[in-house]
Image (cartoon, helix red, strand yellow):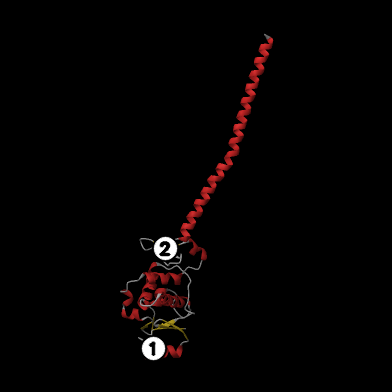
Amino acid sequence: MYKKALSLLLLCNGIVLMGCFCVREITQAALAAAPHVLLRLEDMESLSQEQAISEMTEGKSNAGMGIADVTASGQRVVSYNVMEQGDYRFLEEEELDVLRRIVEAEAGNEDEDGRLLVANVVLNRVDSDSFPDTVTEVVFQRSKGVTQFSPVASGRIHTVEVSEETIEAVDRALAGEDISQGALYFAARRYASSRKMKWFDEKLTFLFRHGGHEFYK
């Protein structure tokens, strides 16, 4: 009788020990698997962030160069890579409208580089100590009662319809692209008076010709 009781006790202890061992093994297995699961979730989050950044920086801009997008309301949205460069010139909407309009009025029949050059000249003047400090003041400046740009004198600057090509050219200029060689003046010899062109030839330094315009400083 005593032997049977002892055998039963030993059997119960064995069952308890086996149960504890199984529980420990299951717990260790779960802990070993947990980091792997967490790592996969972190990888997925990192991948999602990288994809979001890639989509933001690789989207085609309004300028065709990854520079800026335009929302349906017309407000520009500058992409991340442009802000990272740090050389994009931001203008208030009124200033931007004036710049686009003078480029369209002066070079609407030129190629995109011709439009870019006109934008470059306006911005060069803004940066020069010899001219006013804003786009609007530069474009509408009068010297001895004479306007600096003929579309301002004729009022055409207010009636032009700005094209997509002009918007792209202006955005290129605002992004820092300058092919003007520092030009501060330009003229269309074909349409300018001989008196005006004489002043250009005698007082200024000729730089180059592009399309229908000659550029000076």
Mark 2: which amino acid?
Asp
The residue at 63%/19% (across/down) is: 12
Quarter occupied by residue 214: bottom left
The residue at 57%/39% (across/down) is: 34
Q: Position of residue 49 (x, y in %)?
A: 50, 52
Quarter occupied by residue 173: bottom left
Vertical relation: 203 (above or below) 2: below
- Mark 2 is surrounded, within 10 Å at the Cα level, by few (under 14), some (14 to 19) or many (20 or more) other residues, namely some
Direction from residue 66 to residue 155 in the image, left or right: left
Provide the residue designation for mark 2. Answer: 69
Asked whether 170 or 10 is in front, the reply is: 10
The residue at 58%/39% (across/down) is: 33
Q: Quadrant of the N terminus?
A: top right
Asked whether 205 or 44 is in front, the reply is: 44
Direction from residue 155 to residue 9 in the image, left or right: right
Provide the residue designation for mark 1. Answer: 196
Vertical relation: 198 (above or below) 25: below
